[in-house]
C-alpha cells in the first residue's frame, strides 16, 4: 500500500437534480481570512456575476465571511454541474488573487503556499475539496437557509443587523436594487400555508 492510499480525503457528493436549489459553503485555504479585504470580496462578487450568466443559475442568497462563503443558488438548465459552477467562481477569484499578490505583496505568497509531500508547491486561495453542498427542495428550508446566511455576520460580531453587512444579499432583500448582486426573487419557491 503506497502513502497516497492511506490519506483520507473528505469528498463532497454532488447531486445535480433539475429543480433543486443548492446551499453551498466553501472556505479559504486553511480557513485563512483571505476574504477580509474589500478587494478580494469584490473579486468574488464579480466572479458570481460572470458565472451566473455563463453557467445559468438563479442566485437566491449569499454572504461573504472573512474565511468562507455561503451561496444559495438554483440552476436554471435541466442539465448542469455544480462542480462547473463552483470552478467558474473559485478559479476566477484565485487567479486574480495570485496575480495581485505576486505583483503587489509577494511576501504574502507564503500564506497561500501548499507544499505537497513530493515537494511540489502550489499556491491556493481556496481550501482543497468541494466544500459543502446541500440540495434544497422544500420552500421552508430555502427560507431558513436565507435567514441563516444573513445572520452569519451578526453571529460573528461583524455587524449589528444583517443589512449592515454589505457583503451579503440581506440589503437586496430589504430594498431591491440596493445590494451588490441582484437576487432572483421571482424564482424563489412560494410557501403555501
Image (cartoon, rainbow, N blue to C red):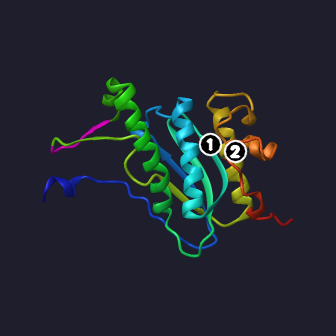
SS for dot 2: loop
Magenta stretch bounds: 113-118
Instruction: Say whether disc 2 or disc 1 marks the residue closer to the N-terminus.
Output: 1
Farthest residue toward the right?
193
* Residue of label 2: 169
Q: Position of residue 14 (x, y in %)?
A: 48, 65
Residue sitting at 59 percent across and 59 percent down? 53
Position of 52 compared to 175: left or right? left
**Label disc, if present, on residue 176 of the rendered structure:** none
Residue sitting at 30 percent across and 29 percent down? 110
- Residue 193 visible: yes
* Residue of label 1: 63
Q: Is residue 148 above or below residue 87?
A: above
Circles 2 and 1, Cβ within 8 Å, touching? The answer is yes
Which corner quadrant of the image does residue 180 belong to? top right
- Residue 175 inside the magenta-drawn segment: no
SS for dot 1: strand
Residue sitting at 67 percent across and 50 percent down? 61
How much space separates mark 2 and mark 1, taking CA atoms? 7 Å
Q: Position of residue 6 (x, y in %)?
A: 21, 54
- Residue 126 visible: no
Amino acid at each position: 500500500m503506497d502513502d497516497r492510499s492511506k490519506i483520507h480525503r473528505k469528498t463532497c457528493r454532488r447531486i445535480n437534480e433539475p429543480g433543486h436549489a443548492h446551499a453551498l459553503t466553501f472556505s479559504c485555504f486553511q480557513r485563512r481570512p483571505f476574504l477580509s479585504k474589500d478587494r478580494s470580496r469584490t473579486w468574488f462578487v464579480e466572479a458570481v456575476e460572470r458565472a451566473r450568466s455563463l453557467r445559468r443559475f438563479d442566485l437566491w442568497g449569499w454572504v461573504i465571511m472573512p474565511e468562507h462563503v455561503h451561496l444559495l443558488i438554483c440552476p436554471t438548465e435541466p442539465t448542469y454541474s455544480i462542480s462547473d459552477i463552483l470552478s467558474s467562481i473559485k478559479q476566477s477569484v484565485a487567479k486574480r488573487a495570485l496575480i495581485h499578490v505576486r505583483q503587489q505583496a509577494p511576501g504574502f505568497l507564503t500564506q497561500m503556499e501548499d507544499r505537497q509531500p513530493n515537494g511540489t508547491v502550489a499556491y491556493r486561495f481556496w481550501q482543497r475539496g468541494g466544500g459543502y453542498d446541500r440540495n434544497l427542495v422544500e420552500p421552508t428550508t430555502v427560507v431558513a437557509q436565507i435567514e441563516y446566511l444573513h445572520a452569519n455576520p451578526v453571529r460573528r460580531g461583524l455587524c449589528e443587523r444583517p443589512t449592515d453587512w454589505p457583503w451579503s444579499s440581506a440589503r437586496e432583500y430589504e430594498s431591491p436594487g440596493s445590494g451588490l448582486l441582484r437576487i432572483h426573487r421571482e424564482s424563489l419557491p412560494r410557501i403555501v400555508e
